Every structure is written in structure tokens, then in C-alpha cells.
Image: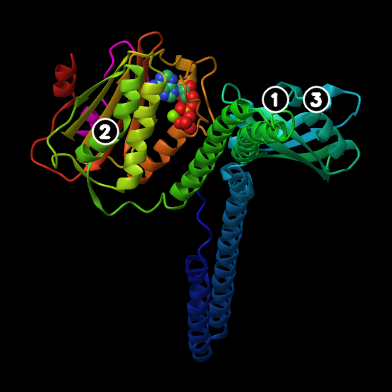
Amino acid sequence: MSTTPPDPIRSTSSTAWPIMAAGAVGVLAIVAVALAARLDPLTAIAAGAAVAAATAICVFAADRSGEARYRELMRAAASRAGEQPPFASLVNALPDPILVVSATEPDDLTSRRYIFANAAARDLLRIERGEGLLVNAIRDPDVLDAVDRALFAGQDAECVYEGGGAQSRTLRTYARPLGLALDGRRLAVLVFRDETEIRQVERTRVDFLANASHELRTPLASLSGFIETLRGHAKDDASARERFLSIMQVQAARMSRLVDDLMSLSRIELGEHIAPADEVDLAACVSDVLDASAPIAERRGIKLKIKLPRQGAARARGDRDQLLQVIQNLVDNAMKYSPDGGVVEVALQAMLSPEAASAPYRPGAARLSLLGPDVPAPTYAALRVSDRGPGIPREHLPRLTERFYRVEGQKSGERSGSGLGLAIVKHIVNRHRGGMTVESVVGEGTTFTVYLPMRPSAKVASAAEVVAKVS
Ligand SMILES: Nc1ncnc2c1ncn2[C@@H]1O[C@H](COP(=O)(O)OP(=O)(O)OP(=O)(O)O)[C@@H](O)[C@H]1O
Ligand SMILES: [Mg+2]
């Protein structure tokens, strides 16, 4: 409850009445003295006494009012002093966890207490009260050591604190001395700054560079090895030269594909915030990709089962080249991870509601949304690419769209990849304000679904209709 400050206008008017009364009595006294002077001395004395008494009463009344006013002000001041000081509310509202610690004895761990913990600190350290034994809130020896240096050596200290329970957070912790309290206790403040995201970005950058250079170094090492061999003992061996040159060609192609993928990824990321403006016929794009993939499918005996709407029925705002890349990557993966003689199904559906577009497709499969649109569009076109390959264990699903991420121990046929394909797919779909899900059953196969916004239309298929069509 807030205390109303004293109102200077009201305070003036409440003390005005005794002064006005005293003035009135003064006027009466003058009149009385004048009358008395014309009457007789006794009456004049009586009138003077009356004036004196009335003035005294009025002055007393005025005094009483001033005292009451003074008391009222004191009461207001006292109740203000009992309020939370505004800085405490301010510190409480700060997002960084802050703890004030006090201690008396360096050797007595139980003398270290936290005497203030803002809401963020209570949340981080899972403490209910703003006061208690420090070791009950923090057990990390590095943090306790930093606190001691601030308390007993008067030094600024900092360290890294790994906390936050199940969702592990990395926080830089700053301990600063605050001097002595009035009762002689030493004081220090602990401020935590969450660096989890910064570290994550840094780790991703370091991993990316390490992975990219590793991926390039392998074919490069192989190329320089073969060059050496060709210059040395294979110099005059025509058949060996032919064999080595064809291996070198494969390695050079691998390097060139890797560089292309990296360039493509960085180009897509640069323009990711700009939604594409062209209109693209998705059915025509799928047909083009499948035509190009047919020879490889044929060579490996893979049957391509295709379900497409009529040309022109699935139009989306898009970048044709990028959408071709999406479809190509998904079809490539499905074929690459299929056994020879396997089956790959490619289905495109138009005019789906947001729920229908992202509805589960493979009953009993582990399923994950790899990307969801921020704002759902009214209608979507969904492309589903399914295979009957080895499937992907559930624990790998969240990492599939990370750059260079590959599931260990999978056979990938003739073409081993670098783990950039799905990262490229995700960024392109994101640019198109679409979504992406994966469903997989180990030993049975995998389905990737990509859905892209279409223009609104009268007839929109519901999720129930889609499931009914599938089952
Ligand atoms: N259809 C699939 N079946 C089984 N595993 C898959 C399938 N699609 C992707 N994966 C797994 O996900 C990983 C990442 O796929 P991604 O397409 O990003 O990389 P890649 O195919 O290995 O290489 P790239 O696409 O760059 O040539 C693959 O290495 C593979 O382990
Ligand atoms: Mg791939």
C-alpha cells in the first residue's frame, strides 16, 4: 500500500482557522477596548481580560493543530521508512541473478549468509527465501572461493558457474566487496551473467570451422598422395595412372560439392529474412527432380512411387532453384539410405490446413518438428518423401539439421555425404516461411515432410482427411 505524501495545500488550510480566530478576537478586543473607554474602567478591564483569554485559547488551538500536523508527518515518514526501499524493487526486477552475502569469520563456513537474493537469483539457485546459509544456496567451490576473496581479501573475483538444474546453464559469476555493515559484518555482492547462448554460438563456430577443414582435408590429402604416386613409381604404369586419375576425379568432385554446399548455405542464410517473391509450380519442380534422379534409381533398382497433383494445382511463393535443392536433397537422402531394390515414395499434396500439413504420417514412428512457421498461413502444400531404409534412432532426430551432422554407422551406398544437405533444406524452408518434420521407425524407414505456404483458397483439407487418405 502506498503512503500519500503530505499535501502542502491541505496543511496550510488546516492550520489557518486558529489564526483567523485570533484575528477575529483581536478585532473584537479593539472594539471592546474602545467601548470600554467610553463606558467605565471596570468594564474595560473585564473586556481586556476577555481579549487576553480568547487570544490565549486561539494561540493554544493553533499550537495544538501544528503539533497534530507534526505528528501526522512523523507517522507518514515512519511508515515510509518501513516500506521496501525503491532500489530493492529495482534489483528484484533485474534479469541477472544478484545475491548479497555477509560473513564474520573466515574460518566459519556457517557465518557466510546471503542476506538478499533477487527474484532471478532465487529462481536460479532454487531458494525460496531471500536470506539463509550461503552453502545451502551454492556449493560450487569456485564460486565460494570467489565470494571469500571479495569478503576477506577485498578483491574483485570471477569464475564460471554451471548451474540451472536439468537445463544446464553456464553463468559467469562476479564477486565484488561491499565493505562493512554497521554491525561490523563483511559484505559482498555476487552477480551472475548467463553466457549459455554466447558459448553455444562460439562452440558452433569452432565446430563448424573444425568440421569444414576436416572435410576438405580428407580429399586434399588423398589428392596429394595420388599426385606423389603418379610422379613416382606409377609414372610409367598406364593402367595404374588411369585408376588413380579416376579416384582423383571423385575426390575433386567431392571437394567441389562441399565448397558449393558451404557457399550455398551462406548465401541462403544471408537472404533468409527476405521471403521469395516468385510463384513456383511445386508439382513441376518435383517432376524435374525425379526425372533427374531416375537413372540412379534405375541403376540401384530403387522403385520411385510418385503421387502428384495436376500441374499448376500446387503453386507456392518461392525461389525455384532453392526449392529444387530442397526436393533434390530429400530424394537423394531417401535413395542413399535405401537398400538396393528399395522403394522411395514421393507425394505432394496441395490446399492443406496448417494442422493437416504437419499431421503425423507414419503410425508409431518417432516424430519431431524440425522447423515450424512463426505465423501459420491459411493453406499449405506438403511434400512427403518416404523410404524403407534403416530409419533414424530417436535420439539423433533433433540434430539432423545441424551442419555436418551424420548418424554414425549408417550405410550410405556409393555416395557418402558431408552432412550439409538437411541444414540447407531447413534454411531454405525457413526462408519460405514453411515447416519441416521427420518421422522414423528404426528398421522400417523414414519420412521427411516439408510444407510451404500457398495462397488462400476455398477448399482446405483437414488433418482427419489427410490421415484417412494415408491409412
Ligand atoms: N532418409 C534417411 N534415412 C536415414 N538416415 C538419414 C536419412 N536422411 C538423412 N539421414 C541421416 O541424417 C544425416 C544428415 O543428412 P544430410 O542430408 O544433412 O547429410 P548427408 O546426406 O550425410 O550429406 P549431404 O546431404 O551433405 O551430401 C545423414 O548423414 C544420415 O545419417
Ligand atoms: Mg543428404
Estimate the spatial distance between the alpha carbons at disc 1 and disc 2, rounded to whole Å: 64 Å
Amino acid carrying mark 2 in the image = Asp
Residue 326 position by quadrant: top left
Amino acid carrying mark 3 in the image = Pro
**Direction from residue 356 to residue 25 in the image, left or right:** right
Res. 400 in view: no
Estimate the spatial distance between the alpha carbons at disc 3 and disc 2, rounded to whole Å: 64 Å
Residue at the disc numbered 2: 291
Along the line of sight, the residue nearer the viewer: 378 or 21: 378
Res. 241 in view: yes
- Image location of residue 59, percent across then percent down: 59, 69
The yes-or-no answer for disc 2 within 8 Å of ligand 2 is no
Residue at the disc numbered 3: 141
Instruction: Determine if the magenta segment contains residue 367.
Output: yes
Ligand 1: which quarter?
Answer: top left
- Image location of residue 165, percent across then percent down: 60, 22
Estimate the spatial distance between the alpha carbons at disc 1 and disc 3, rounded to whole Å: 12 Å
> Judging from the image, what secondary structure is the residue with disc 1 in?
helix
| Mark 3 nearby-residue class (10 Å; few <14, some 14–19, many ≥20) | few
- Image location of residue 364, percent across then percent down: 32, 10
| Mark 1 nearby-residue class (10 Å; few <14, some 14–19, many ≥20) | some
Question: Are the residues flagged by discs 1 and 3 in contact, CB closer than 8 Å?
Answer: no
First in residue order: circle 3 vs circle 2: 3
First in residue order: circle 1 vs circle 2: 1
Residue at left 81%, top 39%?
Answer: 187
Q: Quadrant of the C terminus?
A: top left
Residue 259 position by quadrant: top right
Question: Depth-wise, is mark 1 or mark 2 nearer the camera?
Answer: 2
Mark drawn on residue 137: 1
